[in-house]
Image: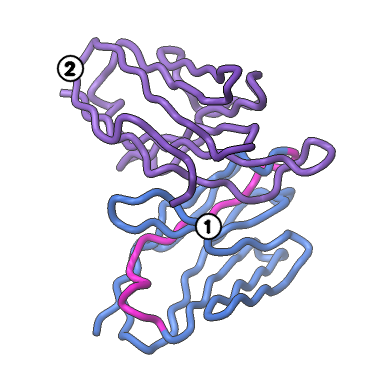
Chain colours: A purple, B blue
Amino acid sequence: DSGVTQTPKHLITATGQRVTLRCSPRSGDLSVYWYQQSLDQGLQFLIQYYNGEERAKGNILERFSAQQFPDLHSELNLSSLELGDSALYFCASSFPTGGGGITGELFFGEGSRLTVL
Amino acid sequence: GEDVEQSLFLSVREGDSSVINCTYTDSSSTYLYWYKQEPGAGLQLLTYIFSNMDMKQDQRLTVLLNKKDKHLSLRIADTQTGDSAIYFCAESIKGNTGKLIFGQGTTLQVKP
């Protein structure tokens, strides 16, 4: 158990719909990362938040957005869903070392599997 | 650009050594990682190596880094059936060790 909790574990929805994925980081971790794992694109970095602020952005579509709340949990919002959005969405967290650096280890949740029909 | 390449499949017999290879393109990578993913589970960090190291050993795992050729390998000694999983190589982007570029993953099949 990594200590990172993601809900829901599975989600089935229709094209055009909107869903929210939730992530609770490990206790004390300030950074949250979202990754997408799909058959054709592999594992891709989407976005990172650090203590409530967006820190880095990857290949995240404009239809997707995320936020990190004061209690440090994060949500990934996916809207106008398309078939190609079907994937496993991972959240990871880490605790920064001094100077704002990162420990070098991300702790991953078990993922939320999204199926768009 | 940033890219990480791995072979997709490796099959070994129980007790043999497994070697999973990876090439990367970003010479400014700070850390290079090996993650393991078992069916239905998240990614588990196995080991990582700092870019100024050549080798790191951790029990049955040996990581070799050839920075000149941008080649990373993971050797698993005495491979067990419980080692069957997908293994991902990843590099971190300079300045942000949480933003990882992953390879496509190598499926390791261990036959009894």
Q: Which mark is residue B21?
A: none
Secondary structure beneath label 1: strand
* Residue B70 pos. (x, y %): 65, 61
Q: Is residue B35 visible?
A: yes
Q: Residues within 10 Å of mark 1 (few under 14, many from 20)?
A: some
Q: Quadrant of the N terminus of chain B?
A: top right
* Residue B20 pos. (x, y %): 47, 70
Label 1 lies in what chain? B
* Residue extending furthest toward the right: A99
Q: Which residues are magenta?
A: B79-95
* Residue extending furthest toward the left: A117
Residue at left offset 51%, top offset 39%: A92
Q: Which mark is residue A14?
A: 2
Tell me, yes or no, whether the highlighted magenta stretch contains residue B94: yes
**Circle 1: residue type:** Leu
Q: Mark 1 — residue?
A: B45
Residue at left offset 33%, top offset 69%: B84
Vertical side of B70 occupied by B59: above or below? below
Q: Quadrant of the C terminus of chain B?
A: bottom left
Q: Nearer the viewer, mark 2 or mark 1?
A: 1
**Circle 2: residue type:** Ala
Quarter of the view holding residue B81: bottom left
Q: Is residue B1 visible?
A: no
Vertical side of B16 occupied by A96: above or below? above
Vertical side of A53 occupied by B15: above or below? below
Q: Nearer the viewer, residue B76 or A74?
A: A74
Residue at left offset 28%, top offset 16%: A81
Label 2 lies in what chain? A
Whether the residues at callouts 2 and 1 have beta carbons within 8 Å, the answer is no
* Residue A68 pos. (x, y %): 56, 20
